[in-house]
Amino acid sequence: MTARGRRGAAARRRRVVVTAGPTREYVDPVRYLSNESSGRMGFEVARAAAERGDHVVLIAGPVELATPPGVTRVDVVNARDMLRATREAFRTADVLVMTAAVADWRPRRKRRGKWRKEGGGESATLELVRNPDILAEVARRKGDRLVIGFALETGDGVARATRKLERKGADYVVLNDESALGADRTTVDILGRDGSRRRLERRTKRAVARVLVRLKPLRA
Ligand code: CTP
């Protein structure tokens, strides 16, 4: 390839931001609220994007997974850290894929010392406040850039996922259910803002990821 060809190819590389894994919301220095997300779907999306030549930033909650080759990884712990990192990375990006299972709630305050039971009764209350909705916040300023969200719904989730797609301002929402958690294979419905619906049945997460990184922005 000529130098000009190389420069052209580099200029056309998409910049893709992927979020993955759970977030962890600390109650005290040793306890936290979190969820079952393994991060595998997001890591597969990051891998698939890098394999097709995209420049990839992977914003990962606490997970035990190796960084895919060619991917820049930013580790975060809680939802507010993830929001900051995602905003920053998306500023210069073309695509956002939000696979992260962001905790919807966090304790109002993190205790500085361990939460002890001495002096307490037989019950305790933990006050929670809402975390920011990262997808909704970032999608608000997306312009014509591509934003893909996920929706984990139990039962028949198409109607709920469609409402989520509209409410959050994403181009696509990938609907899955709790059987995807930690599993190698998953069944998803890819719902588009244009009313499109594509079902991928019992595919590996790697195969689903390869479909997701080929999605194109939708016209407003
Ligand atoms: N999401 C987010 N910030 C949050 C919660 C969710 O960015 N605080 C994103 C997820 O990464 C996912 C999408 O929103 O791409 C949908 O997540 P989901 O957990 O299914 O929806 P919620 O908005 O949390 O709604 P609920 O749990 O009440 O169904």
Image (tube, helix red, strand yellow):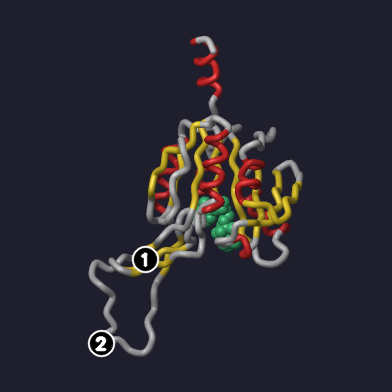
135 vs 51, nearest the viewer: 51
Quarter residue 31 falls in: bottom left
**Residue tagged by mark 2?**
119
Instruction: Name the residue: 61% across, 51% down.
Output: 205
Helix, strand or loop at label 1? It is loop
Instruction: Name the side, left or right, on which 165 lies relative to 10.
Output: right
Query: Separation of disc 1 and disc 2 at Cα?
Result: 21 Å
**Residue tagged by mark 1?**
108
Of badges 1 and 2, nearer the viewer stands 2
Residue 119 in view, yes or no? yes
Mark found first going from the N terminus, 1 or 2: 1
Helix, strand or loop at label 2? It is loop
Mark 2, residues whose alpha carbon is within 10 Å: few (<14), some, or many (≥20)?
few
Quarter residue 79 falls in: bottom left
**Which quadrant: the C terminus?**
top right
Instruction: Name the side, left or right, on which 86 lies relative to 179.
Output: left
